[in-house]
C-alpha cells in the first residue's frame, strides 16, 4: 500500500478529502491527519509517506516551509498542495522545490485524482520498465547500405488532434482511427518512420537522417494529418535520440507537455518541442497588473476600446505565464477578475461579477483557451453593461443635481473633488461622467456659468472688472480676463463699452 498523510488547519477539508475518493481501491492508505505544519513535517520525516496532501497555509509552518525542508533533506515524499486564490503565487513557488501538483479550493474530485495519479506515476517511474512487446509498430524505416554502421538519429513525437467540446467519445475514437490509418499508409510510402499507439496516443518515430530540413518535413506531416482527419493537429516533438530504447523516456517527456493542447488555438505554430515555449517572449506577474489597470481605466472611463485592449493584453500574458497548464490559466483569470472587483470597489464602483466558486466551475468546463478567454471576457462585458445600464438610469438625476449645485456655488472655490463628493461619486469616474453628460469638461462648464453671471454684472452694475472677477469666483482679474476673451473675443472692459454705446 502507498502511504499518504493529510494536513489542513480546517478538519472539514481533510474529512472531505477522505470521502472524496476510495483510497483503498487506489492502493493508498491514509496514515495520518494533521492541523498544523510542524506536525505534518514531523510525520513526513518519521513515517516517510509516499504522498503528502498539504494546505499551503497552516499554523506553525506553511506548506512552502515544509517543502523547503524536505528539499534540503532530499526527502522523496510527493507533495500535493491545496491553495486558495490569495495563495496562488506561493503555490507556484512551491513547484520550484519539486511539488507534484497543487489544487485550488474547493477541491474537485477529478483534479484530485489527476494529481494523485501523477504521484503514483512518479513512484512507478523509479522502476523504468520498457515493454516493447506491448507496442504494435506500423510503417518502416529502411537502412540503405551507405548508412550502415553510421550513427543514426531518431525524432520521436506525439500527434494530437485538437478537439472542441462538440465531439463525443465515439467521434473522437473514429478520428483517432482515421489518423492512425493515414499515418500507416504515409510511412509505408515514405519509409522514413514508424507509427504506433501507446496509452491511446499516436506516437511517431522519424528517421531524422533522411530529412534535409526537419521543420519543412514536420510541417508537411502536420498538413497531411490535418487534411486526412479534418482537424487541427498539434505535434509535440521530443529530443533527438540515438537508440529506440530511449523512446519510452522521451514519450513520457512529450506527454508532460500535452497541457499545451488546451492552448493550441492560440499558437502561431502547431509544432512544438521540449526546448522551446510555443508562446515566446517574457511575461511577469507585473504584466498582468498592467493589463488589469488598462481594464480598470476603461471601465471607469466608459471606454470599451480600452477594456478590449486590456483583455487582449491579459490573454497574451496568461498564455505565457501558464506554461501549458489549464489550471494556471484558470487561476490567473479568476484572480484577475477578483482583483478587478476589489480595485473598482475601492474606487466606489460595484462591478457585479459572479462569485468565485461559479468563476471556477465555469472555467473548468472549458475545452480550450479561446473558450475560457471568451467566457471571462463575456462575464466582464456583461458586468460592465449592467453597471452602465444602472449608471444611465441615474445619470439624469445626478447630472441635474451637479448642475444645480454649480449654479448655487459657482462663486465659491468649487473643485472637481468637492462636486464629486456632493453627488457621491468617485472623482475619476465623475470627471468622465460629467463630460459625457454635458459635452464639456468640469472646469470649462464652471467657467461658462461664471462668465454668464459676469456679463450680467458688467451690464447692470458699475463694479470694476476685478471686483466682478472675484464675485463670480475667478481667483484674479487676469484669469477672468483670459477666460472672458476666449469666450467672447474681447476683454470685459471692451465688451461693456461696446454694449453701452450700442
Image (spheres, helix red, strand yellow):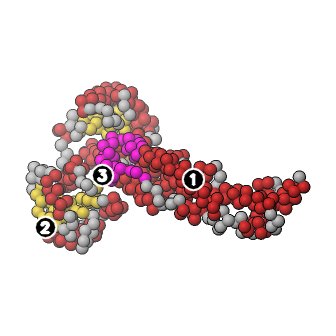
Label 3 vs label 1: CA separation? 38 Å
Question: Which mark's residue is nearer the viewer, 2 or 1?
Answer: 1
Whether residues under marks 3 and 1 lie with C-beta atoms below 8 angstroms apart, the answer is no
Location of residue 262 by image quarter = top left
Name the secondary structure under disc 3.
helix
Name the secondary structure under disc 1.
helix
Q: Identify the residue position indicated by label 3 in the image.
A: 357
Q: Tell me residue 22's x, y (percent).
A: 12, 50
Q: In this view of the protein, can residue 328 be seen by the observer?
A: no
Q: Residue at x 54, y 54 (%)?
A: 398
Q: Tell me residue 294's x, y (percent).
A: 51, 54
Q: Identify the residue position indicated by label 2 in the image.
A: 47
Q: Is residue 271 above or below residue 10?
A: above
Q: Is residue 249 magenta?
A: no
**Residue at far right of view:** 501
Question: Which mark's residue is nearer the viewer, 3 or 1?
Answer: 1
Quarter of the picture holding the N terminus: bottom left
Q: Tell me residue 163's x, y (percent).
A: 33, 35
**Residue at far front of view:** 460
Q: Mark 2 packing: few (<14 Cα in 10 Å), some, or many (20+)?
A: some
Q: Is residue 392 left or right of residue 339?
A: right
Q: Identify the residue position indicated by label 1 in the image.
A: 399
Q: Is residue 145 left or right of residue 45?
A: right
Part of the protein shown in magenta: 351-379
Number of marks present in the image shown:
3
Q: Is residue 328 above or below residue 142?
A: below
Q: Nearer the viewer, residue 257 or 163?
A: 163
Amino acid at each position: 500500500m502507498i502511504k499518504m498523510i493529510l494536513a489542513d488547519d480546517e478538519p472539514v477539508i481533510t474529512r472531505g478529502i477522505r470521502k472524496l475518493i476510495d483510497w483503498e481501491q487506489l492502493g493508498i492508505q491514509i496514515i495520518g491527519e494533521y492541523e498544523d505544519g510542524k506536525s505534518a513535517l514531523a510525520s513526513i520525516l518519521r513515517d516517510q509517506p509516499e504522498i503528502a496532501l498539504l494546505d499551503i497555509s497552516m499554523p506553525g509552518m506553511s506548506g512552502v516551509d515544509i517543502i523547503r525542508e524536505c528539499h534540503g533533506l532530499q526527502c522523496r515524499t510527493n507533495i500535493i498542495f491545496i491553495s486558495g486564490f490569495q495563495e496562488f503565487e506561493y503555490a507556484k513557488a512551491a513547484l520550484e522545490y519539486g511539488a507534484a501538483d497543487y489544487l485550488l479550493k474547493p477541491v474537485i474530485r477529478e483534479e484530485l485524482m489527476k494529481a494523485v495519479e501523477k504521484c503514483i506515476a512518479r513512484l512507478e517511474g523509479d522502476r523504468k520498465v520498457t515493454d516493447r512487446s506491448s507496442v504494435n509498430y506500423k510503417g518502416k524505416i529502411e537502412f540503405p547500405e551507405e548508412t550502415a554502421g553510421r550513427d543514426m538519429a531518431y525524432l520521436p513525437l506525439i500527434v494530437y488532434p485538437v478537439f472542441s467540446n462538440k465531439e463525443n467519445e465515439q467521434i473522437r475514437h473514429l478520428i483517432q482511427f482515421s489518423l492512425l490509418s493515414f499515418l500507416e499508409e504515409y510511412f509505408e510510402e515514405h519509409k522514413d518512420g514508424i507509427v504506433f499507439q501507446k496509452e491511446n496516443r499516436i506516437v511517431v518515430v522519424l528517421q531524422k537522417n533522411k530529412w534535409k530540413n526537419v521543420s519543412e518535413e514536420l510541417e508537411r506531416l502536420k498538413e497531411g494529418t490535418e487534411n486526412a482527419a479534418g482537424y487541427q493537429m498539434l505535434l509535440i516533438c521530443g529530443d533527438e535520440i540515438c537508440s529506440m530504447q530511449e523512446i519510452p523516456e522521451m514519450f513520457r517527456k512529450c506527454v508532460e507537455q500535452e497541457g499545451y493542447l488546451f492552448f493550441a488555438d492560440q499558437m502561431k505554430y502547431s509544432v512544438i518541442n521540449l526546448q522551446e515555449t510555443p508562446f515566446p517572449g517574457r511575461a511577469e506577474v507585473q504584466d498582468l497588473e498592467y493589463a488589469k489597470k488598462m481594464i480598470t481605466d476603461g471601465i471607469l472611463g466608459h471606454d470599451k476600446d480600452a477594456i478590449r485592449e486590456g483583455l487582449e493584453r491579459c490573454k497574451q500574458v496568461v498564455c505565457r505565464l501558464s506554461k501549458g497548464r489549464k489550471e494556471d490559466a484558470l487561476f490567473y483569470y479568476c484572480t484577475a477578475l477578483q482583483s478587478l472587483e476589489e480595485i473598482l470597489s475601492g474606487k466606489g464602483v460595484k462591478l457585479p461579477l459572479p462569485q468565485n466558486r461559479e468563476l471556477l466551475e465555469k472555467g473548468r468546463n472549458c475545452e480550450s483557451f479561446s473558450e475560457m478567454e471568451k467566457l471571462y471576457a463575456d462575464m466582464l462585458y456583461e458586468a460592465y453593461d449592467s453597471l452602465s445600464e444602472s449608471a444611465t438610469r441615474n445619470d439624469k438625476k445626478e447630472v441635474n443635481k451637479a448642475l444645480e449645485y454649480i449654479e448655487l456655488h459657482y462663486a465659491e472655490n468649487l473643485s472637481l473633488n468637492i462636486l464629486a463628493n456632493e453627488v457621491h461619486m468617485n472623482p475619476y469616474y465623475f470627471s468622465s461622467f460629467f463630460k459625457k453628460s454635458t459635452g464639456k469638461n468640469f472646469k470649462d462648464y464652471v467657467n461658462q456659468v461664471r462668465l454668464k453671471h459676469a456679463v450680467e454684472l458688467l451690464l447692470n452694475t458699475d463694479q470694476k472688472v476685478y471686483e466682478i472677477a472675484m464675485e463670480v469666483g475667478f481667483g484674479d482679474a487676469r484669469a477672468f480676463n483670459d477666460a472672458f476673451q476666449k469666450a467672447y473675443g474681447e476683454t470685459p472692459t471692451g465688451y461693456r463699452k461696446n454694449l453701452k454705446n450700442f
